[in-house]
Image (cartoon, helix red, strand yellow):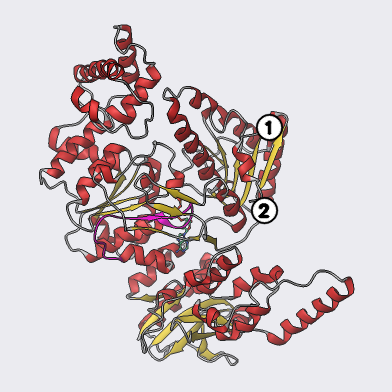
Amino acid sequence: MNLLWSSTFTDALGKLTPQEQKQVKLTATDLLFDPKGNGIQLHRVEKTQGLWTARVSQDLRIVLHKDGDHTLLVYVGHHDEAYRWAERRKLVQHERTGAMQIVELVERVEERLVYAEKVVEAEQAKPLPVRKPFAALTDDQLLDVGVPRDWLEPVREAPEASVDGLFDSLPDEAAEALLDFLTGGRLEDHIALKAAPGADPYTHPDAQRRFRVLDNVEELQAALDQPFEKWAVFLHPAQRSLAERDWSGPARVTGSAGTGKTIVALHRAVHIAKDEADARILLTTFSKPLALSLGRKFEILTEAEPRLREKVQVRTLDQAAYELHAKHFGQPSIAKPSQIRSAIADAIKAGLGEGLTPEFLFEEWEEVVDAWNVTEAGAYAVVPRIGRRTRLGPQQRDAAWSVFKFVRERLVQRGVMTWSQVFARVQELQEAGEAIGYTHVVVDEAQDLSVAQVKFLGAISKGRADALFLAGDIGQRIFHLPFSWTRLGLDIRGRSHALKVNYRTSHQIRSMADKLLPATIADMDGIEEGRRGTVSIFDGPEPEVVLVDAFNQERDIVALFIRECLDAKMLQSEIGVLVRGEGQLGRAREAIKAAGLDVRDEAGVAIATMHDAKGLEFRAVVVMACDEDVVPDAQRLATIGDVADLEAAFETERHLLYVACTRARDRLLVTGLEPGSEFLDDLTSQA
Ligand SMILES: Nc1ncnc2c1ncn2[C@@H]1O[C@H](COP(=O)(O)OP(=O)(O)OP(=O)(O)O)[C@@H](O)[C@H]1O
């Protein structure tokens, strides 16, 4: 006997009070021990075959589906409402795909009446004919993407204005396919897998996104104990397949912001931990706040199986390299950027680096000399100056090298080393076959890896086919100039796959943010990432872009927006105000104060720079201070020493605005002073 639960049960449970949730937990646990429900009062739901209710308390009922070997928890709610829910649904195996679906009954009569009324009204007013976007689709086309047979006609008859309601009623796989079709995609890209005859309808990939088999009582209790996170259980088939595949080499999951790449990385780590007895996994990312957040999610995911935690370490990649260095060579003392700058300044004072600016030399050090760990003049003459397009003649190279030699000597004198040097030494360990303590590395936010980090990971990927799994979005690269991974020994060609369902951001906000980036972005290895064809799973209000003439006008508009969000029952902590840099944080604070709130309140409205916002999400976001000289950051662009690098830096500024806008779930407001950031023209374009 199998006990399963569905995502609809999870949603309904989340709406009950903690006290009610406890009562449900007791009854659900009883059902696990007694799936036949002998000791529990069960009642058949008269109008629907296979559905029953189980009594939790005088008022609460769990709705169950019982069929052969399976008992499925589908819903929970107060008596009348639970029955109403059950009477309007049935569970059926889809005739074409073989996936089990919860199908809403089509209320044909009622619909026809409403529709007829609309037609009459429409005739009276003589408006344009009603557009039905799916009218021409055949039964086969619709069945192939998982539309239930009962819904073929209602789908074809649905007027464009009512498609949102239609999508709410359809199984997710069908809704996603039709939504993509509506926005220019192809239904052929969504043809569902067909299960083998006689296969368990609950194990179909589309069924697994809504149903979960409970293996043991710990799993049920863990799921019921805490505010239940859907991502921990109900993966999209594409997410599950990437997390659980047997990869033949290093692999990468891509996808635009909010498509669940982090979720896949987490599930990948858990999958390896479950699958491989001797696995030692490093689950990592680039910043401490992101590593903390990854760690918290990992705890949630392993709630039912805490023993898996012994196999996984969550920390930043720098921290992991630091620890390895400390263990094998002693604790490194890391050089600060200010030390490098002052060494360059001293070298110039000493007459070195003739004709080259300190800024150019610093960037050359960061992007080329240190990044590639170039230690000799000969190597500098041949190093691929990727990302640097200003050519250096032999004399300039010599002049530059004299500075870098000086800097290297200075670092040795001071007993400090750069991160690149730390990674290079740890990489040598790995290449020499020393056990570095990790069998697998799972990296989130991989678009922002440095050259030295990619080289190190490249060495790890040689160890075993499935040693390395990366998650990242090239469109969100905000820290480094682009470079080729393949040239550094990390080859993911043929193993990079994009996710297309956005779980975080409303359709309206995502569509607007997408306009900031081209439809396709290629990385330096020529791997193309198509960004179109992504669908959001929910709708929301249109985002707004407002430009004003004065700071106080902007402040008042933002304050009003925050008040509106609070009136709409959002918590303060669910609202974020994001700005380009430290210099604009004051504007954010003023707006929050003007909304009558305390800026020091830890649980208050969050304020962050766009860089720090990476990895965060809020129900409402204000991207503030998008002025002409702030986004892109005019000061930063002015200090770029290599003129040819300007273009690449300009792109990272665009990425930053994309990252900021895509932190929003339901509401987005973008503000600035007239004439505003040039990127806002793209954001508001009609294309
Ligand atoms: N299968 C799922 N079911 C429910 N929610 C999901 C699922 N996958 C992802 N989410 C939710 O969608 C949101 C975005 O997920 P996640 O942070 O993994 O996306 P991402 O692609 O890594 O985003 P970014 O590129 O902005 O870092 C999160 O709130 C996450 O919990």
Which of the pair 680/334 is nearer the observer? Answer: 680
Residue 345, how many percent across, how many down? 34, 13
Q: Quadrant of residue 45?
A: bottom right
Real-space Cα distance between discs 2 and 1? 22 Å
Q: How many marks?
A: 2
Residue 575, how many percent across, how many down? 58, 46
- Please tell me whether mark 2 sits on a helix, a strand or a loop: loop
Q: Height in image: 224 above or below 146?
A: above
**Which residue is rendered at x = 73% and y = 30% of the image?**
549
Mark 1 = which residue? 675
Which of the pair 269/216 is nearer the observer? Answer: 269
Is 251 colored magenta in this rendering? yes
Mark 2 = which residue? 542
Which callout, 2 or 1, points at the residue further toward the start of the chain? 2
Q: Nearer the viewer, mark 2 or mark 1?
A: 1
Is 547 colored magenta in this rendering? no
On whether ligand 1 comes within 8 Å of the CB at mark 1, the answer is: no
77 sits to left or right of 131: left
Residue 278, how many percent across, how many down? 16, 60
Residue type for callout 2:
Glu
**Which stretch is magenta?**
245-262
Q: Residue furthest right?
A: 124
Residue 533, how many percent across, how many down? 52, 60
Q: Quadrant of the N terminus?
A: bottom left
Q: Height in image: 157 above or below 225?
A: below
Q: Height in image: 350 above or below 166?
A: above
Disc 2 to disc 1: CB gap under 8 Å:
no
* Dominant secondary structure of the residues highlighted in magenta in the image: loop
- Please tell me whether mark 1 sits on a helix, a strand or a loop: loop
Residue type for callout 1:
Pro
Which of the pair 614/58 is nearer the observer? Answer: 614
Residue count near mark 1 (Cα–Cα under 10 Å), binned few <14, some 14–19, many ≥20: some
